[in-house]
Amino acid sequence: MTLPTAGFSFHVQAREGAARAGVLDTPHATVLTPTFMPVGTQGSVKGLSPEEVAATGARIVLGNTYHLWIRPGPEEIDALGGLHSFCRWPHAMLTDSGGFQAFSLTNLVKLSEDGFAFRSHLDGSRMHLSPEEAMRVQGLIGADIAMQLDVCPAANADSTVVRQAVERTSRWAERCLRARRKDQAVFGIIQGATDVQLRREHSKAIASLPFDGLAWGGFSVGEPIEQMHAVLGEVGPELDPNRPHYLMGVGTPLDLMHGVRAGVDMFDCVLPTRNARNGQALLRYGRIVIKNARYRRDPRPIDEFCGCPCCAGGFSRAYLRHLFLAGEMLALRLLSLHNLFVYASLMAEARNAIVEGRFENFFQIFLDRHKEELKSA
């Protein structure tokens, strides 16, 4: 299948089961998949420079359309050369549609066929996000990949509400494609909550449209994580194999591994940097709460086998604990660097395992170690 957007392509280099090792070419970077995208909500991965983010292994980041639309505004970003130039990120970039934030971060949201009507969380001004406006804003922001506007039902929504969200997302998909910027790749979003049959139906509907990539939305919104893994394991391998697959807003290292096994190529989540700001250093199979007294005299790095700037730089658990308790920003920066490095390294190792035909063994070892960690926690 030839993808319609100039400068954007995807091809799979190796497969094992549903798991894929691919190459995603964009105008700004070639991205090896599976890959994790750090979240730069305001055009910045909190506390880190673009060079530091790239040093963790990231070659694509996510920008938040809602927040950039509210401040500083897409026209200002466009006037300064687009978000790549504005924030000095030279590699690939994806922007979400802004719909989830418009629905979840503001009061008195009114959802209609024409989009989301709401008030800005900054100054209370009236805002309206339609499929056409979502594409206009993302076009001005200028990321390599834009997302269609969709409706994400709550985890506890009844079947009627979930189906209505699916049907409206399909209608909005067509409107987004008509309004798209022609030199910007656009991904369609598949909804359906944990209803396997509805997910299958919607994946066929969205895949029938000329999107450059396909995304799973509406996961990790409150449903039991084991249920998400099970549903993704059923529907993920059935998705069109010729386009990249993106699992939105997910999640832990365990979630990522289940996603890769189900055929997911791209992930994003605030967890690595948000947890860092809460004093948590992530390990592949668990985590360290750095403020705990047990680390007061611990001379070891977070992980002696980790090559991140924090661990390889020799910063001890005791020093990180001291910095965190003292309110020093360096603690949050070092923990963020470490956590993002863990995620990028895990994706790189999963990719190598797929290429070498040993992913299933890699996955089972990961699963066993994760279960051992839970028992000992």
Image (cartoon, rainbow, N blue to C red):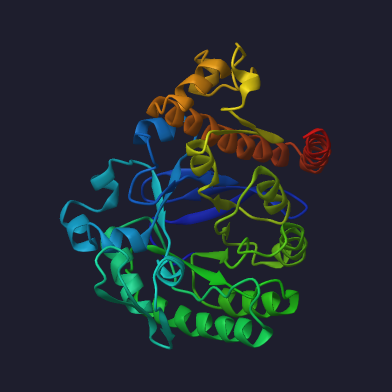
Return the x and y of residue 331 as percentages of the image width and height.
Answer: 45, 26
User: In the image, is residue 208 above or below residue 113?
Assistant: above
The residue located at (45%, 22%) in the rendering is 323
Residue 213 in the image: x percent, y percent? Answer: 52, 63
Q: Quadrant of residue 152?
A: bottom right
- Residue 312 occupies which quadrant of the picture? top right
- Where residue 325 appears, x then y in whole percent? 48, 26
196 versus 359 height, above or below: below
Residue 66 percent coordinates (x, y): 35, 63
Residue in view at x 60 percent, y 22 percent: 302
- In the displayed structure image, the side of residue 315 where residue 233 appears, left or right: right
> In the image, 171: left or right of 225?
left
Q: Nearer the viewer, residue 30 or 273?
A: 273
> The C terminus appears in which quarter of the rendering?
top right
Q: Looking at the figure, which quarter contains the N terminus?
A: bottom right
> Is residue 333 rendered to the left or right of residue 250?
left
**Residue 38 in sight here:** yes
Total labels drawn = 0
Using the image as rendered, state which of residue 147 and residue 26 is in the foreground: 147
Is residue 8 positioned above or below 34 on the image?
below
Residue occupying the point 51% across, 80% down = 169
Residue 284 seen by the camera? no
